[in-house]
Image (cartoon, grey):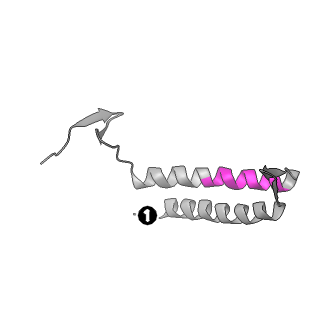
Amino acid sequence: MVTHLAIERFGRIFPVKGQVMKTRTYVVFSALIFTIVAAVHLVRLGEGWPIMLGTASIPLWASLIAFLISGLIALWGFILLGRKA
């Protein structure tokens, strides 16, 4: 029994109250976003860009930690994409 109406977009059916996203699509977008974040932190490390939050200066080593964490999460996402379901 269907409890709500559905609409069809791009050949897929989505519930009106909230769209359903496939797990693979979620992992692809997450891995790409974390890759971009890691790349920005890597560029900051290379170029020495300053970051200020109010009057506090964020040290470059914080970007090294952020690069490692976001890079590992991105790698994890791409590894999950390579697995067979």
Residue that numbered label 1 is attached to: 84
Relative side of 76 to 17, left or right = right
In the foreground, 14 or 17 = 17
Relative side of 80 to 7, left or right = right
Report the magenta residues as a range.
34-45
What residue is at 53 percent from the left and 49 percent from the top?
29
Measured along the vertical axis of the image, is residue 79 above or below residue 15?
A: below
Q: Where is residue 10 in the image (x, y as percent from the top left)?
A: 36, 33
Check disc 1 and report its element: helix, strand or loop: loop
Residue 17: quarter of image: top left
- Asked if residue 46 lies in the magenta stretch, the reply is no
Measured along the vertical axis of the image, is residue 16 above or below residue 35?
A: above
Q: Position of residue 20 (x, y in %)?
A: 34, 47
What residue is at 60 percent from the left and 50 percent from the top?
33
Amino acid tagged 1: Lys
- Asked if residue 39 lies in the magenta stretch, the reply is yes
Measured along the vertical axis of the image, is residue 75 above or below residue 8?
A: below
